[in-house]
Amino acid sequence: MQILIALIAGLVFGLGLILSGMGNPAKVQNFLDVFGHWDPSLGLVMGGAIAVGLVAFTWAKKRHTSLLGESMQLPTSAVIDRKLLTGAAMFGVGWGLAGFCPGPAVMNLATGHSEVWLFVAAMVVGMLAQHAAARREELQVK
């Protein structure tokens, strides 16, 4: 049952990405190009996502288990530190240069375009490098 719900959630997410234009790198880059051919429409998409997320997280914070009975695993830290700012900056630069963030990039693998596959490969390498660095830091603390 959980796999089916995860599949449905992924399909709804992917459909939302397609309908909002988030899967089109040119649309994303035009949103970020405030001094050129600026396209503010993705701001509405982000605002809608923030509104839905705000309601969902407010509700989730009051629960101890998910709707499927699993324990809730929400972030507990509210610290804005160097790691968070560095990660956010790297995400923003990658998003601006490539026009993709992780969800739309994975969705666009189906297009078969080499630049999408290159982006996802670089993303996976970055994730593995971050995981290795975090493990190394964790071992040094012990």
Image (tube, rainbow, N blue to C red):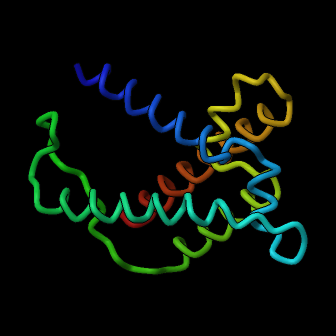
The residue at the point 83 percent across, 28 percent down is 113
Coordinates of residue 134 in the picture (x, y in percent) = 50, 57
Q: Which of 109 and 59 lies nearest the eye of the viewer?
A: 59
Q: With respect to residue 109, does 41 lie above or below?
A: below
Q: Which of 83 and 39 lies nearest the eye of the viewer?
A: 39
The residue at the point 19 percent across, 56 percent down is 60
Q: Residue furthest right?
A: 36
Q: Which of 82 and 31 lies nearest the eye of the viewer?
A: 31
Q: Which of 142 and 66 lies nearest the eye of the viewer?
A: 66
- Looking at the rendered image, the quarter that the N terminus falls into is top left
The residue at the point 77 percent across, 61 percent down is 96
- Left or right relative to 54: residue 94: right
- Looking at the rendered image, the quarter that the C terminus falls into is bottom left
- Count of marks overlaid on the render: 0
Coordinates of residue 49 in the picture (x, y in percent) = 46, 58
Q: With respect to residue 125, does 78 lie above or below?
A: below
Q: With respect to residue 97, does 79 lie above or below?
A: below
